[in-house]
Amino acid sequence: MKVLLSLVLAFLITGGSVVAKASDSESSRKSLRGIAAIEVVVENPSKDALDLGLTEEKLQTDVELRLRKAQIKVGRPALPQTFPGIDWLETYVNAIATLYVRVSVMKHGDADFTPGCIRLPVHAIVIEVELYQPVQLLRDSNVKPLASTWSTTFWGFMSSERSIRESVADQVDEFINAYLSVNPK
């Protein structure tokens, strides 16, 4: 609720807009079926994000914790003690899925949120959560590039680290819901 209130106030004060877009279709959800473990990679936050106290470590912990609470295994599949051969190695590499989280923050200015003129900084925010995994080209089965198979993007205005972290959690929850819809526990 506080995130929504922050977005509405920022929208009214700055004349900006708030838009959310997701690539969460039936086909993108199907691409999540059978993923055994997910590696989480968080892009280094910008200077404006760091100024708010938003760090890579906090975001990494937040995302991994949410996945674990949903009983989604975090990390790479375990390597065997002995090397089982090149076929196994290719299977191992192709089994790795990476959830990539990017939070872009840019200070937009200050805004008065109350009649008492409490000035709060307003930041333009873009949150992207994408799942990357190896895919195979139909025209050449030997080519297996890494591709984004599921994604969600959020744009908005916020004034605090907490509201940004809550919005990241909302985007990760979208991924969790998509993942669990094709990988029921």
Image: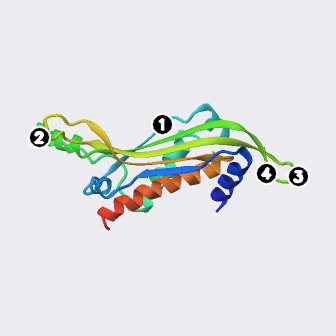
Q: According to the image, label 4 marks what residue?
A: 113
Circle 1 residues within 10 Å: few <14, some 14–19, many ≥20: some
Q: CA distance from mark 1 to mark 3?
A: 38 Å
Q: Position of residue 164 (x, y in %)?
A: 60, 48
Judged by depth in the image, the label closer to the viewer, 1 or 3, is 3
Front: mark 1 or 4: 4
Spatial separation of the CA atoms under disc 4 and disc 2 = 60 Å
On residue 84, the disc is none
Indicate the amino acid at tag 4.
Phe
Q: Find out whether the residues at labels 4 and 3 contact each other: C-beta distance under 8 Å.
A: no
Find disc 1 in the rendering and name its residue.
43
Please tell me which of labels 2 and 3 falls first in the chain. 2
Image quadrant containing the C terminus: bottom left
Q: Is residue 16 visible?
A: yes
Q: Which residue is mark 3?
A: 116
Q: Decide: marks 4, 2 in contact (CB < 8 A)? A: no
Q: Which is nearer the eye, 66 or 133?
A: 133
